[in-house]
Image (cartoon, grey):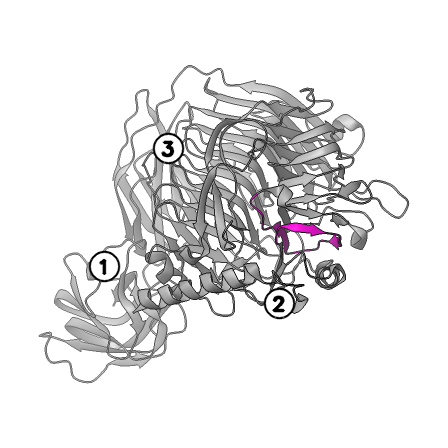
């Protein structure tokens, strides 16, 4: 039935798109038709026969709403059918402007299309979250202004004139801008960055380029300036080794909406459309599920994806109660108008299976109020397939924790698959807005790369509590890196790495186990606003010959007296600590290549880790010792993913814990050369109750209704596994635990932490000595949190039955079930 319904919807969408595309063919189109397309009311599709004054009026009204609307909920897209438009447009927050032609020159804006910073007196350092693509601008003034900072991409743009990347203040001084991106574009005359502090160019063509402040990286540009780092700080790379341009919406020769997916390019130099249309594949709009915020849900989106549909997000805010799961190879996920995905219940917002050729672009991921392990996860943990011939591509993806509201995410973007191409990320833990603070909008890692041979162009990562970027895979490449370390560190002791022995967390950390990695044009900046905090090294990489870093810059923006970045890379490079003299504000290192030829082999993985709760505040760990080609120097113990301590033997006692609380552990072995093993198995247990003891569950078994997943998961001591009903909560669902012998007990805990909304909304507890006769309930109540604790007078029995008595749209899940006396 679902397939039939989707088929009808797709046919209707195609028919509507044909009618919309051809509207106005017999005469002038009405501006009232502009936002009545299949894409919903926040997408305006303009026709060249519409009166220019009407088009400009719509654009002006949108701009007036969005000019200062930095954390608002409104989202818009303005799309132009092929033709010429004599209009003047200013673009504000959360607005996407695009041409619907096959090539940029098919749509020509002859008045002007600009981003200014008048709202901030010329300071464009907060001009975020907007985009322009696939059109030509022939400005009547002879110049176009694009005064932006992060998350404001220009793609497939043809400017017939000059382009300025900044704005002036009221005294005609160049106001600051910080961190722009341009790709696959042609500018006929000069590009003037002026006060742009850093900029990334890829595969562009222009008559000339007019300067640089701190860090400008150009990859595959046709005629870039000479490489003169550090003054001017140009980093020039001849070609992009592997790249796929972002897909875009257009109207094909039959008048139908389609999405064009450019082909993979290798060793690319210049624009993809220099000799005609960009090579690639066109996908009809009827193959897409169009997700509109007023109707789409995680369930409807996943249903469409499971049937092989592609996905197009219209502008708006999408609150998700489940993960959007991309499981099919070559799936295209395209956002227009900065659609924003928010996981409301601590789940991952979007996950991708370890498959070929997925393409995700044009989306803002916003952390929700419950902590998510990650916002986007590409490939599951342990992904190992080779995708070199058809890699997954990620373009214009932006991540935010806090700012628009309270948010929590351990990691924003995690890349587990191999050969992934990243093309323009801004991964931001908010330093301003609402819901911000060191312990409020916590996000430990911005980007974690576990896959091999991952290539990223234009990487912006800022303000996370620990590592901004943690790169664990081999063969990685980064072209341009811009990072501000956190502003709000409260004191030095709160921000120490390496078991509390080194000041701060390097912004760009390549794991000690990596043997090959290369990066170009890295800038790391500090503003320790709240305390005199020091960071030992902005960049930290293994000292091996296969690791190379080119052109590094550290900047002291401002901060508390006594704060500093002490070194640039691996204890090398001068410190930055003040705004004057100039050497105190900016330091550079031109080249780093590792020289190490010694031990690069990590110890074996610690095995058979066990955790035993010996009291209400102590858990003892033990494991099988690791081996190493030289020698194991010790072990690092991680509690709930955070370093808890170290040991030189194969045991450890973790103390000072909370009673009746679940703790999970892993252990890594290390050697004297700094090589670190992979993590051991996970071992979990619950501390004993205050004044009570948790019963030994060895040999216990469980059965459930409904029968789904593995009931034993709730008894295995591993909080990463669970039993779940696999369906919404309804009264009568239950599980039975057989303790194999009669026990005396007066308390039990039902823990679904990690699936925080899957707790029983209501419950009854029964006991039996034969598993058949249950009698009356010994306890009942209402669940209010992921850990349900039930106390009752002491009972002696062999069997325990817990019945779920309420209704909810969540599944009922149990990660661990424990009984106490």
Gap between marks 1 and 3 measured at Cα: 43 Å
- How many numbered markers are drawn? 3
Residue at disc 1, secondary structure: helix
- The reply to whether discs 2 and 3 touch (Cβ–Cβ < 8 Å) is no
Point out the frontmost of discs 1 and 3. 3
Residue 520 relative to residue 737: left or right: right
Crowding at label 2, few (<14), some or many (≥20) Cα neighbours within 10 Å?
some
Please tell me the numbered disc located at residue 389: 3
Residue 455, image x and y in percent?
Answer: 48, 33
For label 3, the SS is loop
Identify the image quadrant of the N terminus: bottom left
From the image, state whether disc 2 or disc 3 is nearer to you: 2
Q: Residue at x 61, y 35 (%)?
A: 535
Crowd band around label 1 with a 10 angstrom C-alpha radius: few (<14), some (14–19), many (20+): many
Mark 2 vs mark 3, CA separation in Å: 43 Å
Q: Residue at 36% of width from left, 75% of height from top?
A: 808
Question: Does residue 372 lie above or below 154 as drawn?
Answer: below
Residue under the point 50% across and 60% down: 18
Q: Position of residue 81 (x, y in %)?
A: 61, 54
Residue bounds of the magenta highlight:
81-102
Task: Give the Cα separation between the discs numbered 1 and 2.
Answer: 60 Å
Mark with earlier residue (2, 3): 2
- The residue indicated by pointer 1 is 715
Give the quadrant of the C terminus: bottom left
Give coordinates of residue 197: x percent, y percent: 72, 36
Q: Is 492 placed left or right of 651 in the picture?
A: right
- Say which of 775 and 651 sits in front: 775
Which residue carries the number 2 mark? 33
Residues tagged 1 and 2 counted as in contact (Cβ below 8 A)? no
């Amino acid at each position: 039935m679902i397939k039939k319904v989707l088929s009808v919807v797709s046919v209707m969408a195609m028919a509507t798109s044909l009618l919309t595309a051809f509207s106005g063919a017999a005469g002038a189109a009405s501006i009232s038709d502009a936002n009545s397309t299949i894409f919903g009311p926040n997408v305006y599709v303009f026709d060249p026969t519409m009166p220019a004054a009407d088009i400009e009026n719509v654009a002006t009204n949108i701009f007036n709403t969005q000019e200062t609307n930095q954390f608002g909920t409104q989202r818009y897209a303005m799309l132009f059918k092929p033709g010429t438009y004599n209009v003047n447009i200013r673009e504000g927050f959360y607005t996407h402007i695009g041409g619907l032609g096959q090539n940029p020159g098919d749509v020509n804006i002859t008045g002007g299309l600009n981003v200014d910073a008048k709202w901030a007196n010329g300071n464009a350092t907060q001009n975020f979250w907007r985009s322009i693509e696939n059109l030509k601008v022939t400005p009547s003034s002879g110049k176009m202004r694009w005064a932006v900072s992060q998350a404001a991409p220009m793609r497939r743009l043809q400017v017939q004139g000059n382009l300025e990347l900044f704005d002036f203040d009221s005294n005609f001084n160049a106001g600051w801008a910080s961190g722009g991106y341009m790709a696959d574009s042609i500018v006929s005359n000069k590009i003037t960055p002026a006060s742009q502090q850093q900029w990334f160019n890829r595969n562009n063509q222009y008559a000339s380029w007019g300067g640089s402040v701190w860090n400008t990286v150009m990859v595959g540009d046709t005629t870039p300036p000479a490489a003169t780092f550090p003054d001017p700080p140009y980093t020039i790379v001849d070609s992009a080794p592997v790249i796929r341009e972002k897909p875009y919406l257009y109207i094909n020769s039959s008048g139908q909406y389609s999405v064009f997916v450019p082909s993979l390019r290798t060793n690319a130099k210049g624009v993809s459309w220099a000799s005609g249309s960009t090579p690639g594949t066109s996908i009809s709009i009827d193959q897409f599920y169009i997700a509109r915020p007023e109707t789409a849900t995680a369930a409807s989106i996943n249903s469409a994806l499971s049937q092989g549909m592609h996905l197009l997000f219209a502008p708006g805010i999408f609150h998700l109660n489940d993960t959007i799961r991309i499981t099919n190879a070559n799936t295209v996920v395209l956002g227009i108008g900065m659609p924003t995905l928010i996981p409301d219940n601590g789940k991952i917002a979007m996950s991708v299976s370890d498959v070929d050729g997925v393409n995700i672009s044009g989306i803002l991921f916003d952390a929700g109020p419950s902590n998510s392990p990650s916002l986007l996860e590409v490939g599951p943990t342990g992904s190992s397939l080779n995708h070199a011939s058809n890699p997954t591509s990620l373009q214009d993806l932006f991540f935010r924790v806090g700012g628009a509201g309270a948010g929590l995410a351990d990691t924003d973007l995690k890349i587990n698959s191999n050969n992934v191409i990243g093309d323009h990320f801004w991964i931001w833990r908010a330093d301003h807005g609402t819901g911000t603070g060191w312990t409020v909008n916590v996000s430990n890692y911005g980007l974690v790369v576990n896959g091999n041979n991952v290539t990223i162009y234009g990487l912006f990562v800022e303000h996370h509590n620990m590592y901004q970027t943690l790169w664990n895979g081999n063969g990685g490449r980064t072209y341009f890196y811009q990072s501000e370390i956190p502003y709000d560190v409260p004191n030095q002791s709160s921000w120490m790495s390496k078991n509390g022995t080194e000041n701060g967390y390097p912004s760009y950390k390549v794991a000690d186990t990596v043997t090959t990695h290369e990066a170009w044009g890295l800038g790391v900046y500090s503003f320790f606003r709240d305390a005199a905090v020091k960071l030992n090294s902005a960049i930290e990489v293994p000292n091996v010959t296969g690791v190379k870093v080119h052109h590094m810059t550290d900047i002291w923006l401002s901060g508390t007296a006594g704060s500093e970045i002490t070194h640039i890379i691996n204890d090398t490079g001068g410190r930055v600590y003040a705004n004057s003299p100039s050497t105190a504000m900016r330091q550079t290192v031109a080249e780093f290549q590792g020289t190490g030829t010694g031990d690069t082999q990590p110890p074996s993985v610690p095995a058979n880790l066990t955790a035993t709760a010996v009291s209400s505040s102590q858990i003892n760990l033990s494991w099988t010792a690791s081996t190493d080609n030289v020698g194991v120097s010790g072990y690092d113990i991680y509690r709930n993913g955070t370093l808890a301590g170290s040991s030189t033997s194969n045991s450890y006692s973790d103390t000072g814990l909370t009673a009746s609380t679940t703790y999970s552990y892993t252990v890594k072995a290390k050697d004297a050369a700094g090589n670190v093993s992979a993590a051991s198995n996970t071992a979990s247990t619950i501390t004993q109750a205050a004044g009570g003891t948790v019963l030994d569950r060895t040999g216990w078994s469980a059965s459930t209704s409904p029968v789904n997943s593995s009931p034993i998961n709730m008894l295995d001591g591993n909080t990463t596994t669970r039993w779940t009903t696999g369906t919404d909560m309804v009264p009568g669902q239950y599980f039975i635990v057989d303790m194999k012998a009669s026990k005396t007990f007066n308390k039990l805990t039902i823990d679904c932490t990690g699936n925080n909304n899957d707790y029983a909304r209501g419950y009854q507890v029964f006991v039996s000595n034969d598993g058949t006769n249950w009698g009356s309930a010994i306890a009942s109540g209402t669940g209010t949190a992921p850990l349900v604790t039930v106390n009752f007078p002491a009972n002696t029995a062999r069997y325990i039955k817990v019945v779920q008595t309420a209704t909810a749209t969540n599944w009922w899940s149990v990660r661990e079930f424990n009984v106490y006396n």
